[in-house]
Amino acid sequence: MAEDLTKRFGEFVAVDKVRFTVHEGEVFGFLGPNGAGKTTTMKMIQCVSPMTAGTLTVFGMAVSSHQREIKRLLGVAPQETNLDPDFTVRENLLVYSRYFDMPRTTAERIIDELLDFVQLRSKRDTVIEHLSSGMKRRLILARALINSPRLLILDEPTIGLDPQARHLIWDKIKSLQSQGITIVLTTHYLEEAARLCDRLVIMDTGRILVEGRPDELVRAYIGSEVVEAANEPEVIACLARNGASYEVFGDRVQIYTTNPREITYTLLKECKLGQLTARSATLEDVFLKLTGRKLRE
């Protein structure tokens, strides 16, 4: 739980008095464009970046005073692939287990179970450079589970993966949640967030813009449907006359509605348009509406 959590780097405020609560056993997401403050927030939860002000507790323990105890309860899968290239799959896990003072026989048993869980048993003696990107991400997930964590932190868990590997990781994450593990993740894949997260926050410029369930946020900020039309003066005038909710993005106009048939009929009848498209509203629509479409570096 965080209350007025703040992180400054000199005069720059990376995280600005944010408040959130993660419930045990849920999947909670931090979304936002680059530089929003989500990774900085995750690092404070991991006890690797000290907070500047506010309060932050993990399982009731303050990160400022119980770092060792908290870290023993965490499993962390970073965005970067930081496996040891000189070791095999099994050796990477065995070396990592030593950070938790695990007896070798216990570690070997857990490693075999984890390799089965992430479907890498056949690769146990393979060196890292011979693994695919998807296999490396699964191995990093297995490594994060070596200490049987209560809280699993995933930073871009499926970055760069093909659809098959991504879906496999999704299945593993939901399986871990069913075992009672609390999961906190960041992702730039909005479909992933909508599919995995029970609740999430969208951050920008160090602040939390919204918090809630993915489906509730879509209904609250967009509606159930999006109708797209060409950005033409007569379309804008027609929408204005009918009081429709819309936004202009380049050469397209997006109309947010809970009744796509009615707005489509109105546009076709009054504006005499030749082409309209309708689709279900998504979390990506919410994200872009709140944070804008300007590219962040």
Image (tube, rainbow, N blue to C red):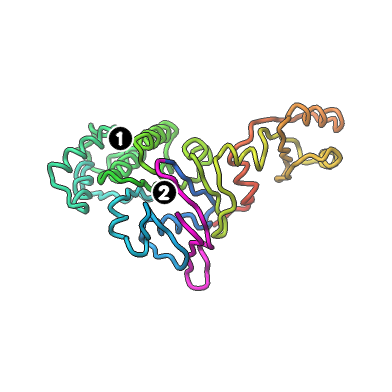
- Would you call the spot at circle 2 few (<14 residues within 10 Å), some (14-19), or many (20 or more)? many
- x 39%, y 49%: residue: 79
Question: Which sits in the foreground, 285 or 153?
Answer: 153
Point out the stretch of residues depicted in magenta: 1-25
**Residue matched to label 1:** 118
Q: Residues within 10 Å of mark 1 (few under 14, many from 20)?
A: some
Looking at the rendered image, the quarter that the N terminus falls into is bottom left
Q: Main secondary structure of the magenta part?
A: strand
Extreme residue in the front direction: 60
Q: Quadrant of the C terminus?
A: bottom right
Mark 1 or mark 2: which comes first in sequence?
1
The answer to whether any part of residue 217 appears in the image is yes
Q: Residue 233, percent across and down?
A: 84, 42
Can residue 98 be found in the magenta stretch? no
Mark 1 → mark 2, Cα distance in angstroms: 18 Å
Residue 169, relative to residue 98: is it above or below? above
Q: Quadrant of residue 273?
A: top right
